[in-house]
Image (tube, grey):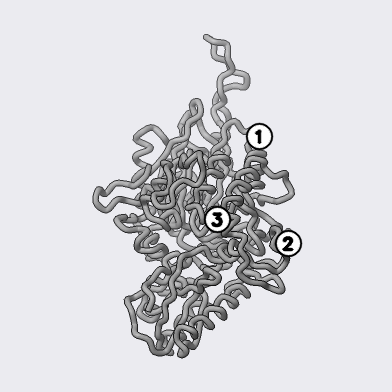
Amino acid sequence: MPATSQPYPSRRRRTYGVLAAAAGLATAGALVAALPAGAHDAKHGKPLPSRYQDVQLLSFNDLHGNLEPPSGSSGRVTEVHEDGTTTTIDAGGVEYLATHLRQAREGNKYSITAAGGDMVGASPLISGLFHDEPTIEALNKLELDVTSVGNHEFDEGAKELARLQNGGCHPTDGCYTDEGFAGADFPYLAANVLNEKTGKPILKPYWVWKKKDVKIGFIGVTLEDTPGVVSAEGVKGLKFKDEVETINKYAKVLQRQGVKSIVALIHEGGLPASTAYNYNCDSPGAGDGISGPIVDIAKNITPSVDALVTGHTHAAYACTINDPSGKPRTVTSAASFGRLYTDTTLTYDRFTGDIARTAVKSANHVVTRTVPKAPDMTELISKWNTLAAPIGNRPIGYISADINNAGTESPMGDLIADAQLAYGKELDPETDLALMNPGGVRAGLTYAAKGTEGDGVVTYAEGFTVQPFSNTVNLQDFTGAQLIQVLKDQVSGSTAACTVLYCPLPSCATVRVVAAAALVVAVVVLVPMVERGPAPDFRSDGTSAVLSSV
């Protein structure tokens, strides 16, 4: 998905019937322990547990294989201060993420770590070159307990996703190390992703975390519009169901099994009014400072679900959105690329088996680079960088200054469009114009050397990180009216009808995504007179840009 500055893809709008209100939530007064302090089991003489148990939920989303600290604006977050001023903080990198999560868990015997999808896909070379096995290994070391699938988990299809879950060497490239590949220690949840033939979820729909007498269920879904943002080959044979209907269905299943505390992991998100990670999106009221698909979803998910961990839009928020009964419910997202993690306190009521939602607290925390690096992650990165070095360290160009990726129209995006316009003219001298899909630019380029290559040298690995997609070159003709509409949609942001990032309307249907082989990047090239091919899939992130060349 695009960086935080990009609009979210348009999605089919829908209206849900209002769900029946749940039983009244526990009031603040109900949070008084039902047992007297120091109560003991008369038979065994042991202290009895109190009625309420705080459970720590650590969460993040949209890691996209960013094991090393992301560069440029992709590796920073914005913090807003009380006086309205802002500062930027360097953030991200699994060496630091591991340290932060491990420190956060200290003293918390009841702690769960969950994720909201897109752990892999559109990954830098260190992970993408090895079909994201390095990222799965890193997540295992992070002690991730559970994650939903995201759209990028389907970049290489359902069979490859199953391999990431279950292990085994790649069917084409084989084993990369003597140890082979063991797969994920954590379950991927895909409640709304069905096999078209069997009608059953391709992976587990839910998972239950248990510790002593405390149990919390997790339901994982990805956005229903996943076929609209990945390649057709990646979702072949799959059906993606409505997020709300699916979560409500499995919430009932969990309740029938006696699991009343439920968290939904949803790879769909929203856009807060500010890009600052600590922006209060509950100002002036619950959820007033956030928009986007997650608002509609959150308002219709059954009140029996106690919290929503979301993703996809690469935005940062920790706020509340009222459920169908009108009660506030926590909804979180931790930006992307491992720059943030969310720490949520869920207060579990042992008498009811449910979460006392009046006590839920949540906040995002920066994965700063001022803490010690986790040695096991440093070792992992070194191992895979050594294997990638022969390809990744190869120089492919030179720059004289940083080329950043900040904003919808960024210097990096402009450079890509300029380069591919030149390449388009080589293919057809009549090529007039190039437009770059902003969601397809994953990073900028920095002048300072990352390794021994020297300042200003652009390596293959750095170019790959700018856009890690497999794209082919396509040329397409546009009418003037179509071009004007595309440009309007680019600057106006997401609308219910059409956006430049994903547009099903005829006015956008002939846009083609193309790539320059030198930089491994994607743009839209427009030409006045070439034979029109089949209607393209113009995607939000470039992953579906593998189209037949003209």
- The kind of secondary structure element at disc 1 is loop
Considering only vertical position in the picture, is 72 above or below 194? Answer: below
- How far across and down, in percent of the image, does residue 272 sit? 57, 62
For residue 541, side relative to residue 70 (left or right): left
Q: Which residue is mark 2?
A: 87
Q: Which residue is mark 3?
A: 286
- How far across and down, in percent of the image, does residue 378 sit? 65, 45
Q: Nearer the viewer, mark 3 or mark 1?
A: 1
Q: Nearer the viewer, mark 2 or mark 3?
A: 2
Q: Residue at x 37, y 62 (%)?
A: 227
For residue 318, side relative to residue 171 (left or right): right
Q: Which residue is mark 1?
A: 106
Considering only vertical position in the picture, is 487 above or below 221? Answer: below
Q: Residue at x 52, y 61 (%)?
A: 313
- How far across and down, in percent of the image, does residue 164 sit? 44, 46
* Quarter residue 262 falls in: top left
